Image (tube, helix red, strand yellow):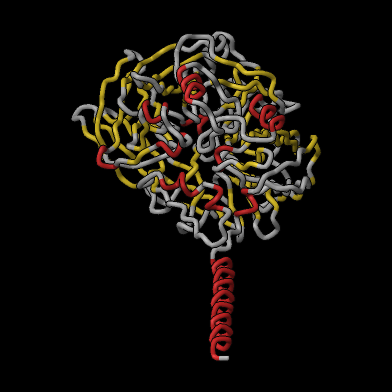
Amino acid sequence: MNNNYFLLAALTLCSVSYTSTIAKKHKNKRKYEKKYLPGFRSLYHESDFTNLEVEGSIPEWLQGNLFLAGPGTFQAGKERVNHVFDGLAMIHRFSFNEGIAGYKNKFLGSKAYKKTQKRKKMSYVSFATEPKRSLFSKLFSLLIHDPVDNAALNVMKYDDEYVALTQIPTAVALGPDTLHAQGNRPFKDSIWGQMTGGTPHIDPDTGEIINFLVFFGPLMNYKLCSFDPYKGLKRKLIATIPIKNACHMFAFGLTKNYAVLIHTPNTVNFLTLIFRTKPFAKNLKWNPKKGTTFYVINRHTKKVVKKLKGPAFFFIHSVNAYEEGDNIHIDLPALPDPSVIDAFYLKTLYNPYHETIFPCSQLKRFTIDMKNDTIKSKRLCEKSLERPCINYHHYNTKDYTYAYGVHSKTHKDLGTCLIKANVKDGSYTIWEEEGCYPNEPVFVPKGTTPGRPEFVAKPNIIDSEDSNIKLINKSARPAVPAIARQSDGREPACPPKLILSNAEGIVSKEREGRVEGSKTDLQTEDDGVLLSHVLDSKTNTSFLLILDAKEFT
């Protein structure tokens, strides 16, 4: 009798404890409610081209196509990729023509996509996800050029052909109407490297595309290369930099006479890559004691003219770089460490009991004194700014005033505002709407005309399953350009990239490689609009925002 009594009491206590635990979990779930999560779900819906419902008006001068490349789905059969950077590529296109807007989205349909769909499992190597492979397979893919064509980062134009890009140095030809892959476009030279920058630069004087390569091998090195997209896919080697360990470098600085590669202490060595049992991202090691190395390359003499040490920091994007006397200024959103990469693992994002921390970057200027061999840094704005853009068309490699980007109010935000920062005096203006999460913006200068290359690489993190898209004028001033609202059923998915390309050919069709200056109606640096794909968590839809860059309303 007494034994039964104690057994019943024990069971009651266990039941109460279990019920309390469940209640606590539900309480935590409410505490860590992640309103941005709809944007990290897979999108399977593909839309044929359709005209959009417009509320308000689209600027008359805004003509052309906006291409967005990014992950469409994170599923490979019953398997799921580990990271938002690893999803299968999908291409979105917004079209603007005489006040009418249209939309279409399709999976890129690359070899990696077709292989994965056929096998119903992960069949390609990516940043933080890797299928099981033999040592021989790893050696083959590392030492023999074995590109993965899941191009979910950028869209550019090489001469008359659109191409989708990833950090593997092989472009995928893209049908601008079908949005489907039309074959790979490897470079026709012997310059070797397995990884490249996600945001190439364009020389504003020559039209050449400049980027770096990372070679993983017994003798690791960085290479700086350039090529003329109007003369074929043959690169010219500018400089080679031997290194012991390679960092995960996504962007670099370019000025009129120099290129600056920034080697952060988030590195990997060759042997680790060969014998690794984990994906590439898990082999990167953060060692802040080593600091950050700035390699300054003279683009004319093709020599590394400076190798200087700076404080340890991490970055993904760069804003702009330019020369002033004996100084080189490089502006970028600096982070204290690479923990931002960890924040985008899907298991973390999907866990309702885990509070995801998104480190807030600081917009900083690193000044290299070429005469005295020193590096100094200062903060340009008290507010965080990430996923930046500028008026690239007119101010790339030049002294400038305004940087635009996404602002996070706290480390719990995935960016709830757009920000316009004055890098001269530190002032700023913010656009926000309750429950909205903007993607990184693209600046489109007013009156842009054909005859000069225009390249903007920005990640798109928007998903949704509703194919109904709208354009809404949210401006308080009738004369200010409209805001384009979309509810295409997508919510933030993963850091893909945005590019604006004029339907008439913002990218020059000059055959000699030299580009003539374009005639525009530009009056000031901020005379234009910002385009940003925004998640509205209140309705689980998204919209394309067209925001007056000058008024910022």
- Residue 84 horizontal/vertical position (percent): 56, 42
- Residue 301 horizontal/vertical position (percent): 32, 13
- Is residue 203 shown to the viewer in this render? no
Judged left or right of residue 358, residue 44 is right
Q: Judge by depth and name the residue closer to the eye, 115 or 307.
A: 115
Residue furthest to the bottom: 1
Residue at coordinates 59% horizontally, 18% vertically from top-left?
A: 158
As drawn, 455 above or below 314: above
As drawn, 225 above or below 91: above
Q: Judge by depth and name the residue closer to the eye, 424 or 185.
A: 185
Residue at coordinates 58% horizontally, 42% vertically from top-left?
A: 494
- Residue 141 horizontal/vertical position (percent): 50, 21
- Residue 116 horizontal/vertical position (percent): 67, 31
Residue furthest to the left: 372
Residue 98: quarter of image: top right
As drawn, 437 above or below 458: below
Residue at coordinates 41% horizontally, 32% vertically from top-left?
A: 249
Q: Judge by depth and name the residue closer to the eye, 309 or 5.
A: 5
- Is residue 497 shown to the viewer in this render? yes
Residue at coordinates 51% horizontally, 28% vertically from top-left?
A: 167
